[in-house]
Amino acid sequence: MPIRLIFRNLVRHKLRTALTVGSLAIAVFLLCVLRALVVSLDAGVRNSTSDRLIVQSAVSLFVNLPASYVGKLKAVEGVDSVARLQWFGGYYQDPSSFFGQFGVDPEKFLGMYPEFKIVEGSRERFLTERTACIIGRQTADRYGFKVGDTVPIIGTIFQRLDGSPWEFQVAGIYELESIVWDETTIFFPFEYLEESLKGGAASGPPGSGVIYIHLAEGVNPVNIAAEVDGLFENGPQRVQTTTEAEFNAQFVSMVGNIPFFVTTIGGGVLAAILLAVINTMLLAGREQRHDMGVLKALGFSDWAVFGVMLGQGVLLCVVGGGLGIGLAQLSSPEIAKLLGTMFPGFEMTSEILTNACTLSLGIGLLSGALPAAATRKLLAVDAFRRGA
Amino acid sequence: MQLVPFSYNLRSLLVRRSTTLLTVVSIGATVAVISGVQALQQGFVTIFEKGGRTDVAVFLRPGATTENQSGFTRSSADILLKSIPEIALTDDGRPMSSAENYMAVRLFKIGGGETNVPVRGVQPMTMTIRADDLQILEGRTFQPGADEIIVGENLTRRIRGCQVGEVIRLNTVPFTVVGTFTDEGTFSSEIWGDLERMGDALQRSVYNRVIGVLRPDVDVPALIEAQENHPQVPAKVMTEADYLISQTGVISATLLGLGAFLAVIMGIAAVFTTTTTMQAALAARTHEIGILACLGFRPISILLSFLFESLVLGVLGGLVGILLTLPLNGIETGTTNMITFTEVAFAFRITPQVLGTAIVFSIMLGLLGGAIPAFRAARMTAVEALRRG
Amino acid sequence: MSSTTATRTVVDLKDVTRAYSRGGERLVVLDALDFNIDEGERVAIMGPSGSGKTTLLNLIGGLDKPESGSVRVAGEELMDLTPPELARWRAGNVGIVFQGFNLIPVLSAQENVELPLLLAPLSRSERRAHAAHALELVGLADRASHRPGQLSGGQEQRVAIARAIVSDPTLILADEPTGDLDRASADSVMALLARLNEELGKTVIIVTHDPLAAASAQRSVHLDKGRWKSDGEGA
């Protein structure tokens, strides 16, 4: 097979080759990003562990569990430790600057989440100081918070009666070993919130939103979950106890059709690019029809001619796809930063990139095979017809 | 200036029909994606915009941006309900205002999975205020003081237990579905029942918000300011229309942002495709250009001729894109409003704005895609074109 | 190619009929034709347009097959070969020169000439050497790196002839080789073909309707409507 013809023909039409490679790169980049969005949605589910259970109200995400539940849960056999968690729902500076804030039992919470690594500042301070907080790497970078800074948060659900914002001192900045949570959230001691409410300094619903359970080793989470649910079956608040994976999955299911929606967009992108590359290759095939007839007249086999056309399609797509994949890989940290809180687990996994490779190759084979099949069936006598 | 007959272009597109078709459908796919996203955004915004009344005021606790963040004690609510002079009165002299409870309740979707459905407890006066907005579709409305609920039309197709006669348990209390209702706005995605019964079942002693019908001559900005600084019950006041629009912000902006991002990225790819095709048209018609130039057609005419041809490609692509998007119109979908964490059902809507954007977008794709080949064609001299053709 | 053996028949067509159906109508292009050419001959096939000259050449070159009859070329019965076998046979036995040159525009003269050698078991350097030699033979060694677009018509055709002889075929088929050339170029191309015939002993078959070109052949035959004209056929 005259391999040189593959390169020469692509180089001959520099503009067309460049445009096709360019649109392929763009499309493959876009497909990688869209796919990464979908994959990031269940990062929390994938990285969940089976030794953590979450107890929440069976009625609503917004109904708090009574304070008395903590003691009752601790007493359940197989429960190693219990941590309260309260969604704070405030905002920094203005409501559109969205990142989550939670009141937690610091020692218990960090105890059951070894994934949290305090990379700057002091874990000790967070465990002991009332108004200390730890901040995720992304939020710290985004707003320039440093250890020792005071972060004012304006309450919505919980409001200080004097109208002032809540103030937390940054004790540390954390990073996650695996994206089981996200690196945008601020955690502060639950007790600070509780005392402010009890002492009349602030208003808001009592109790804690959810309670995290860390199981002792070797305990079957399903049994414990059933036992806990049974404990409060008759109120005052029915609870729903789930594994961490199920709990996180509920938020994924809440955003509803996003995976389908994004996949549909991806389908549109794919259709557009596939047709575009086929178009380029059909144009190339038509142009080289005569040359291919000459090759046949010279005695080249049908498959050699097929290979020259197919090779052009594949080479186009390998180069275009490769550029797109490279672009996706290089830009993914920036995109992750941009998406921030909305898609905390955004990551270009090697699986996505491998799939993109396969896809590019597939587009190349298909778009090359169409004109290749047409030229393969050419008769050598066509070479004699001028300008065929 | 003599223009090159447009029939040349149409014939040229027809002769190279496979390339024309591939290009048109490729542009079509691009336009369809952009239009689809925009139709989603339009559908989302529409339900919030349609439902909002300008003659209804919403009272929230200061600092709260949504009703689930807001809360009034009964005594505060009472003051709001009875002592605001701007509120209109009924024929028998009662203020047309009502306190409401609002909570996202965990319910199961018909297709599997959980979602948070907004449940609203209302006072009888709410039904008077909403008399024109709300229509009972099936069954009847709930009796005050009874464990009965009515269900918004959108929920009956999406959420389990929402048919008339079925029972939904809120915490430990079973409520019977006695009717379904519809409304142009977001209420169609809600469950309504009696305020006090709901409060008991959900163990909520506070009310979330107060609404009231404004008298026609009310100075709204003055009311807003007066209420903010009210000595007894300071409150944030908005017209219902403003309140609902403020709720669409994040999702609407996200969809618009996504649409713009896709339009730029996919638009570049589509321009590349059009350029490739027009470049092939140029190659095929070089000889013809030479002849036209010999005959005395000016470069600008040749330029316009090529631009026209790619414009046709773009517009045809736009039409294909619209055709691909049209079946979406009216298809229902849902998403969670990330501010209230409640599910909102809405439908894709192909509004004139969506169509207009699609056409403008495809015209731009056509013109930008034709630019390079058109300039190349116009710059060719007659001799050169004849020799190369 | 050694020519010490006794003259033997290179082309032997017997009772060959080729027809096309066009719009339901049967159009006989070659009608029960016999044709013999001995090794080392230089034959011109003449005739008006549509007389079947090119079809005849295609049959001899294994590019086309007749409906009936026997086509023996270079000792092989072409009727028995499958298309892939024909392609392989073609690569080894015939060199073809086309009216429109048919050089591959993206390849240099040297690369165009090398092209048929890709089908032979030769090393890269051998291919280079063979191609360079063929280009030298046609007097274009100094144009080896030029693309077809940078050559004149006459030069292009000489490159095409170099390509036809580079794999050392028995038979050279030329279809209107001078059709697109001016007189001077045409004469030099015909002279080149004559030289290949005389000096290298190649059998050369030229389809032409140029009487001057035909005059340079040893023998001329005339086709008309698929049959030999009375004066022709040297069976």
Image (cartoon, coloured by chain):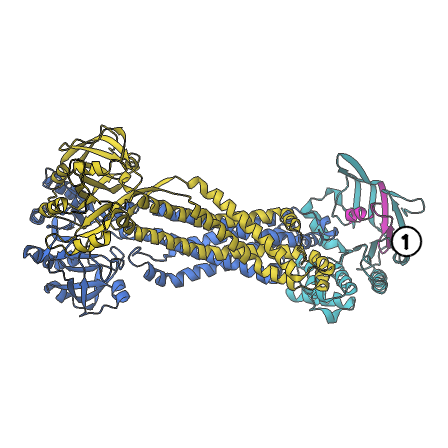
Residue A45 x, y percent position in the rendering? 27, 50
- Image quadrant where residue A8 sits: bottom right
Say which element carries label 1.
strand
Residue C59 x, y percent position in the rendering? 78, 46
Q: Which residues are magenta?
A: C32-60
Q: Which chain is painted in blue?
A: A
- Image quadrant where residue A147 sits: bottom left
Q: Which chain is painted in yellow?
A: B
Q: Residue furthest right?
A: C231
A358 or C194, which lies in front? A358
B24 or C121, which lies in front? B24
Q: Residue furthest bottom?
A: C142
Q: Label 1 marks which chain's residue? A: C
Residue drawn 27% across and 50% down?
Answer: B242
Tint of chain C: cyan
- What amino acid is found at the position of numbered circle 1 in the picture? Arg
Residue A350 appears left or right of B206: right
Q: Image quadrant for the N terminus of chain B?
A: bottom right
Residue A244 x, y percent position in the rendering? 22, 49
Residue A161 appears left or right of B44: left
B76 or A263, which lies in front? B76
- From the image, tell me which residue sits under label 1: C219
Q: Residue furthest left?
A: A199
Q: Is residue C38 magenta?
A: yes
The answer to whether residue A10 is visible is no
**Total of numbered circles in the picture?**
1
Q: Is residue C75 magenta?
A: no
Residue A275 x, y percent position in the rendering? 53, 49
